[in-house]
Image (cartoon, rainbow, N blue to C red):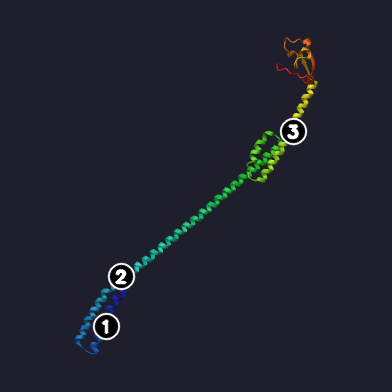
């Protein structure tokens, strides 16, 4: 507003003085007033001429400042937007990496679980084929680590069935050994000193003590000796 008034007043005086010169020359001739108007015209003209560069400079300066302010504001806004975009992009990238890592861990865990299950299945199958009691422990240790409860239960039941078969076979072997020993006792001849009154018996007469009276040694089956309460000699 101040700049407009600064320009308008000298210009107004310049116009009015020009009109006054024309009036006092053509309409109402008056030399004194004409000269006064001429002087005012010259002063106004000089004032306008001097003020124009200053006003132009101030206007340019104001426009420049306005432009700089707008540019600065735009630059700040642009910087803020750019920073927000970078942060958003970084957040999205971090989330993507986290999801990828979680997926990799899930796949690795699932693969390890499947491999463990396959190993347990193989060990149980091998145990079923061999029915070896020495393989039971390792099979159980592997199966107990399986996460799939249904599969774990199935394999444990199969191991239990094999253990039952192993126990049954061992019992059958024990019975067979006892029967074999009993049969041998029925047929094996043993020697008892002191006319059969000694508390121990010998399998070989020649291994009896040197002071044994061989004439008093009695022969009998081992079953009869055991039935009589005698035991094998520990010195033989």
Between 195 and 155, which is closer to the camera in this rendering?
195
Q: Secondary structure at mark 3?
A: helix
Pointers 3 and 2 in contact (C-beta within 8 Å): no
Q: Which mark is residue 16?
A: 1
Q: Earlier in the sequence, mark 3 or mark 2?
A: 2
The C terminus - image quarter: top right
Q: Secondary structure at mark 2?
A: helix
Horizontal arrangement in the rendering, residue 13 relative to residue 110 (left or right) = left
Q: Earlier in the sequence, mark 1 or mark 3?
A: 1
Question: At 29% across and 78% down in the image, what residue appears?
Answer: 8
- On residue 169, which mark appears? 3
Residue that carries the numbered disc 2 in the rendered image: 58
- Front disc: 3 or 2: 3
Screen quadrant of the N terminus: bottom left
Q: Examine the rendered structure and indicate whether residue 64 appears above or below residue 116.
A: below
Name the quadrant containing residue 69: bottom left
Identify the residue at horizontal 67%, vertical 36% (top origin). 136
Measured from the top left, where is residue 108 in percent x and y?
A: 59, 46
């Amino acid at each position: 507003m101040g700049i407009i008034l600064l320009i308008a007043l000298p210009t107004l005086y310049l116009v009015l003085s020009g009109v006054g010169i024309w009036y006092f020359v053509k309409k109402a001739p008056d030399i004194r007033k004409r000269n006064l108007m001429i002087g005012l015209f010259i002063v106004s003209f000089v004032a306008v001429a001097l003020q124009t560069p200053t006003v132009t400079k101030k206007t340019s300066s104001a426009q420049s400042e306005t432009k700089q302010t707008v540019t600065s504001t735009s630059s700040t806004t642009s910087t803020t937007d750019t920073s927000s975009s970078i942060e958003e992009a970084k957040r999205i990238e971090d989330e993507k990496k986290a999801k990828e890592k979680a997926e990799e861990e899930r796949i690795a865990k699932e693969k390890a679980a499947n491999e463990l299950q396959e190993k347990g299945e193989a060990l149980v199958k091998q145990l079923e084929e061999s029915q070896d009691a020495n393989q039971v422990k390792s099979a159980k240790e592997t199966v107990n680590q399986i996460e799939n409860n249904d599969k774990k239960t199935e394999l444990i039941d199969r191991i239990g069935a094999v253990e039952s078969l192993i126990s049954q076979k061992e019992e059958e072997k024990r019975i067979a050994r006892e029967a074999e020993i009993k049969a041998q006792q029925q047929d094996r001849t043993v020697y008892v000193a002191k006319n059969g009154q000694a508390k121990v018996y010998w399998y070989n007469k020649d291994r009896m003590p040197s002071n044994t009276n061989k004439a008093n040694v009695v022969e009998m089956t081992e079953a009869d000796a055991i039935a009589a309460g005698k035991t094998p000699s520990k010195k033989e």
